[in-house]
Each structure stands twice: as structure tokens, then as C-alpha cells.
Amino acid sequence: MDIKIREYTDADADAVMKIWNQVIDDGVAFPQEEELTTENADAFFRQQTYTGVAEDNASGEIVGMYILHPNNVGRCGHICNASYAVRKDIRGEHVGEKLVKDCLSTAHEKGFRILQFNAVVADNIHAIHLYERLGFTRIGTVHEGFHMPDGTYEDIILFYHAV
């Protein structure tokens, strides 16, 4: 799949919202429980430091996205955070890897020094393998830090990468 990563525009709102909401509906990766709506999606994506969109060059379809924003403020404002989402029907085709690599580059361009993930769910093995392969460092584990849809709790892992 020939993918280009580009900056989000308001014309992308519906497609990006649907991909984001797929992850919310799965309930096993993002902390959010409420789906975005057509009324609030564009504002949400625009309030980020950067929202990147993965577009299939052949079809013009949006197949993935990420948001990049500060992880903290003030003396820790050089640390950023990001979330990634890939359309369900094309997961496993390395779109996520392209998103993460683009995010690392964009974070550097935006003046961040560290990309930190606060809550990678421990059973999200594909994400964990990707982050480790790309050189992220595992900081630690928060026991039962994520509330799963079935009512159980899963560990979360913290990662960071210098940008």
C-alpha cells in the first residue's frame, strides 16, 4: 500500500472521526469512552499540536491518523504524547509504523524533545512490538491501569523515545 502522511484538514474530519471511533468502540486501547461526533470532531483534531493523516495514494482514502500534543506543561512541556489509529480493515499493513515514524519527525520539528506514551495496554502486543522495534524505551508498568470493556483491568506500559 502506497501511503503518504500529511497534515489534517477540515475535509478529513468525517473519515478521521470514523477511524478514531473504531478504536473507542474496540475499548482496548484509548482511554476515552465517548465517541467523537460530527459536531466536535473537527475541533478536537484542530486543538492538537498536530494531527497527521495517512492517505492511500492510489484511492485517496484516509486509512489512519495520529494526534500529537504536549504531555505536560512548563518545565515538562518539551515532552509530547501521541495516539494512533488505523482503519480496522487494513490493520497489519504497516500503516501504524509509518504514522509513528512521521510522528517522531513531526514532534522534533515542533520543538519537542521526548515522545512519551502513558498508557499502552499490556495486551496490545502489536503496538508494543512496534514501539520496541522503533527504539522506544519501556519506562515501567502500572498494574491494572486500564479498565477493559468486560469490567476487568489490564496493566499499562509507559514508553518514551527521544525525538
Image: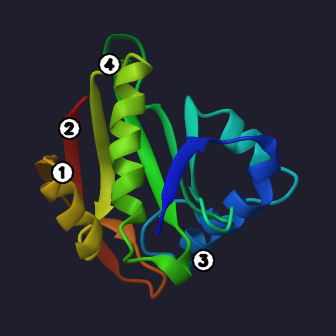
Q: Secondary structure at mark 3?
A: helix
Closest to the observer: 129 or 47? 129
Image x and y of residue 85, in percent: 50, 62
Q: Residues within 10 Å of mark 3 (few under 14, many from 20)?
A: some
Residue 50 shows in the view? yes
Between marks 2 and 4 in the image, the one whose residue lies nearer the viewer: 2
Of labels 1 and 3, earlier in sequence is 3
Q: Where 162 falls versus 60 (above or below)?
A: above
Residue 105 left/right relative to 158 = right
Identify which amino acid the numbered label 1 is placed on. Leu
* Disc marking residue 25: 3
Labels 1 & 2 near each other (Cβ < 8 A): yes
Q: Secondary structure at mark 4?
A: helix
Examine the image and state in which quarter residue 115 appears: top left
Of labels 2 and 3, earlier in sequence is 3
Of labels 4 and 3, earlier in sequence is 3
